[in-house]
Image: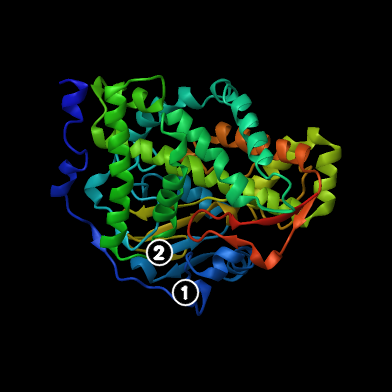
Amino acid sequence: MTVDDRFARDFREPRDDRPLGTRNEIIAGPVADWATDFSHVEPEWSADPYPIQDDLRQRCPIARTERFGGGWLPTRYEDVAAIAYDTERFSSRAVVMSNFRPPPELAPVGGIPPISSDPPFHHDARRLLLPAFTKTEVSKQAPATRALCHALIDAFDGQDVVDAARDYAQHIPMRVIAGMLGFPADDGPQFREFVENTLEGVNLPPDERMAKMAALFDYLVAQIHDHIDHPREDLTTFLINAELNGHKLDPSHVAGTMALLLIAGIDTTWSAIGASLWHLAKTPADRERLVAEPGLLPTAAEEFLRAYAPVTMARLVKEDMHWHGADMKAEDWILLSFPAANRDPEQFDRAAEVVIDREVNRHAAFGLGIHRCVGSHLARMELRVALDVWLERIPGFSLDDPSAVTWSAGQIRGPRALPLRIG
């Protein structure tokens, strides 16, 4: 079979005969008690989840909700870690908690491998990607990333107030991941729409949500065919030609992995850069120290990742069981809050504080267990370069209007509007 034969049909066609999975009614609105009715899409959660998490950790460390068809929210580091490492009882076939559950038949591959894959398939699918994300390979991206950061700041052109989330943070990972995948750099606005649909549209009616996801995969299929017609040295061409256990990747695997790299590669780093700048804008002492001691930046960046970890991942319970005091049912969601784990005082000294010279910092911002972020080196590079260039070029800045800062809703949390007064 030629490459063209393998991708001749839309990759989604074989999936049409599969069960649609469990659909659940939309349940949204104010939360009465976070211990029994939590919702990660409510505005108070996106605005400031930490007091809620701290309260739950004290009085109900594994919260319950009936929304989205039922789910659980552990808030202690030890519980989050135990679930993350337990692939026997918890499946990764769906990592975004929503009102739609993919059918069990999708396991062990899932829709966006390897993050949606269960063992044993996961190991080999993940190993395929590792060479592209080593420290050595990532370091090759640093000069272009630095040049991009300077260009973005050049474009501020004497403005007194800039939106650091919209005009700086979001563009850095968009441009980097687009380059790695071989996508047009000008498609950034589409990337933002795909990110928001995937991660913030979880409360949409299932049919509408699936239609929005179809738009993402239509874009990816077009990119696949463009790469078939015009091969080049990038991740998309690599995936098209890659083999797993002696066989070319299924078209759905290729497109699913591309979706993962695009969405995860953009939103997490966009959020981390924005949250770090938000912290420095409201904390002059930390900003002034980093300007005076630029060598401290790598340590400070790790602390920003710990304190403002952007990522929460979902799992699905495989079978009915009693787990750490909770009566979990098959197909219940588990929301793994790495941000909550990172602020557990049993795991971190001065857990609620941002300590930019924290020496021991084994945080979980990049996840735990077999699904720990394959792109962690890339994310660290982008965060460090983005902060380094900003502090070099704009050493003095503050929040222009704290009330104007807005945060994304759902499982990736970061500033979406961040007006900063510079100079």
**Relative to the observer, which residue lies in front, 163 or 316?**
163
- Three-letter amino acid code of the residue under disc 2: Gly
Vertical order, 280 against 75 (above or below) = above
Residue 311 lies, in percent from the top left, at 53, 50
Look at mark 1 in the image and give the residue it sits on: 36
**Relative to the observer, which residue lies in front, 111 or 285?**
285
Q: Which of the two discs, 2 and 1, labels the residue nearer the N terminus?
A: 1
Is 178 placed left or right of 23 in the picture? right
Q: Based on the displayed image, in which of its 4 quarters is residue 72 positioned?
A: bottom left
CA distance separating discs 2 and 1:
10 Å
Look at mark 2 in the image and give the residue it sits on: 71
Q: Which mark is residue 7?
A: none
Q: Of all residues shown, which one is farthest toward the front?
A: 157
- Three-letter amino acid code of the residue under disc 1: Thr
Determine whether the residue tagged by mark 1 lies in a helix, strand or loop.
Answer: helix
Residue at point 38%, 71% (across, down):
66
Q: Residues within 10 Å of mark 1 (few under 14, many from 20)?
A: some
Is 366 placed left or right of 388 in the picture? left
Marks 2 and 1 close (CB-CB < 8 Å): no
Q: Based on the displayed image, in which of its 4 quarters is residue 49 positioned?
A: bottom right
Residue 63 lies, in percent from the top left, at 49, 67
